Each structure stands twice: as structure tokens, then as C-alpha cells.
Amino acid sequence: MRGVGSRRGRCRTAAGGWDSESETAVCDHYALVVPQDNQGGRSDRRPSRGSGANRQRPGRDQRSAPRTSGPNRARSAQPRTDSEEIRPSGPPIPPHIEAKQLAPEIRGELTTLDRSTADAVARHLVAAGELLEEDPEAALAHARAARARSGRIAAVREAVGIAAYQCGDWAQALAELRAARRMGSRSPLLALIADCERGIGRPERAIELGRSDEAAQLTGDDADELRIVVAGARSDLGQHEQALAILSTPALDPARTGPTAARLFYAYAETLLALGREQDALQWFLHAAAADVEGVTDAEERITELS
């Protein structure tokens, strides 16, 4: 959805990687993978530059592989051994992935599972986190494999929702993120949920979420991320003046830097552009580029277009 307030358009490359030290990009709040500086893996994963517009949107529902089973037979009187247990299938997990790479707070949610299941779920979640930016469809397959083994755990449903969101599968993302919230997720999911409502063509619902009691309790970057989405929903309806008013807050400070500030300035610039104020828009694209220390927008390209 390229355009004002789009969280997966040119401004929003999304879901910054599930790194447990990152707290700025909206999906960085979903801390699944600990830094790997000392273990040869990737640390401080950040959104790549650009929109990911060349990513294929999901067509057919890409379901995880079905549970393996043999022919329909009467239940055997002999108990199965561990090696005979039927377990959910899923994509192969790269050998370098280890369960201990999962953030401790998420591992804590898996303690209700038996050890082998918890290990498999953890490794699928880590694999999903690693693949999220470069291959979101594969990340979604791993997240679904984790869900097949532990569908009652909030962090797992959240992971499926984030991966589906990154794929542009708004309906599935919305269902999974709502489920995670019902299960007690502590992550700030409202901005993602509102953006999914936009994605399935319900901007009015996104605006309504922006007026909710939950929205009123948000502060800092979480509030700004929701503000970007709600402004985008207004612009979806052609209400550009209202969108500009939503974005015009003290948070719109050119001295700020970081991913959320960059996205906020970018959304403001695109709203100005929609209103025909090209010179003002150019100035705010410049502010967005200056704030964008992690490359989450294509503000520099927009500057070139307008110069």
C-alpha cells in the first residue's frame, strides 16, 4: 500500500527483524531473537532500504505442510514409541539455528510445552526472525510450523501475524494479531492491527481504533506509529487535511532521529504532497532523510524526484 501512512509502502519497510535489543521500528517490539555477535550469526537486524514492493503478495493461502499420517486404520492396541509419534511437519530448520537464540522472555512462554516440542517451536521462531526481511514467505512458513505445535501461546500467534503482515496477507495477519492480543500479548500491536484494517479496505475501522481507550494509553514511538496509520487511513478516504492535522503534533520535531521519526516525517511529507504543497513536502522529505539513520524509507529518492 504505497501512500501516506503506509506501513509497508515506500515509507514503511516493516517489521525490523525481531531483534531483542531493537525498540524503535514497530515490529522490533516483538523481541524473538537475541543478538548473535559472539556466535557468528546476525545481530541488530534492521529493515532494509526501500519498500519491498517487489515482494510477491500472497495469492493462495500458503499453509504449513499438513500433519503427517498414514492410512486410516483402527487405533493400535500397542502404544507408540517416541520415534513413532506423529508430529507436525514444516520447513527444514537451518542447522545453525538453536533454540537458545530465542529471546529469554519468549522462551519463558514455551515452558508449558514438553522439551522437544519447545525446542522445535523455538527454532522455527528463530528461523522466522532471520528470514523475515529477505524471504517473508519462508518466515511465514516457519511461524506456521511453530503454531502447528503451540497454537495457544501468544508469542507464537504474534509471530505468525507479523510474518503474514510482512507478506501483505492482511486478513491472516489481523486474525493472528487479534488472537495474540486475546492471549495476553504484551507487545504494542494496535498500530499493526489498524494497518491490517486498512489493508483489507476498512480505513474507517483503523480510524476508530485510533480513537480507542487503548490508543489513548500509547506514548512515544508506539503513539507515533499508530498516528502514522490513522493519518494514512484518513488519506485513504481522501481526507488529506484531517491526515495533516493528525500528524501535526509536538512529535513532529526535525531534531529527532530514528526509524519512527523518519516514518513520521515521511508521512507528513507525503500528506503535504497530496495537498499540492510540493516545496513544503520537499523540506519534510529532507527532514525524513536526515532522521533516517537506519534506511527505513526512500526519502532520498523522493528528494531527487522533487528537486
Image (tube, rainbow, N blue to C red):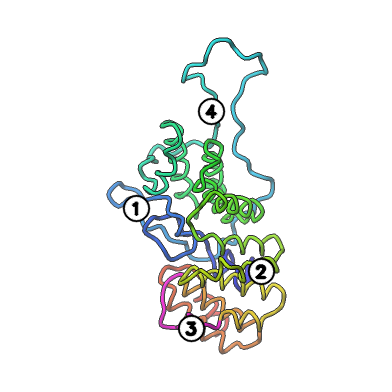
Residue at the spot x=52%, y=22% of the render?
85
Alpha carbons under labels 1 and 4: distance apart: 30 Å
* Dot 1 alpha-carbon crowd within 10 angstroms: few under 14, some 14 to 19, many 20 or more: many
Query: Nearer the observer, disc 2 or disc 3?
Result: 2
* Dot 4 alpha-carbon crowd within 10 angstroms: few under 14, some 14 to 19, many 20 or more: some
- SS state under label 4: loop
Q: Are marks 3 and 4 in contact (CB under 8 Å)?
A: no
Position of residue 175 relative to residue 190, above or below, is above
What residue did someone put label 4 on? 87
- SS state under label 2: helix
What residue did someone put label 2 on? 208
Q: Amino acid at mark 3?
A: Pro
> Counting residues from the N terminus, which is met first, the one under dot 1 or under dot 4?
1
Query: Nearer the observer, disc 3 or disc 1?
Result: 3
Position of residue 140 relative to residue 214, above or below, is above
Q: Amino acid at mark 4?
A: Arg
Query: Nearer the observer, disc 1 or disc 2?
Result: 2
Alpha carbons under labels 2 and 4: distance apart: 42 Å
> Counting residues from the N terminus, which is met first, the one under dot 3 or under dot 1?
1
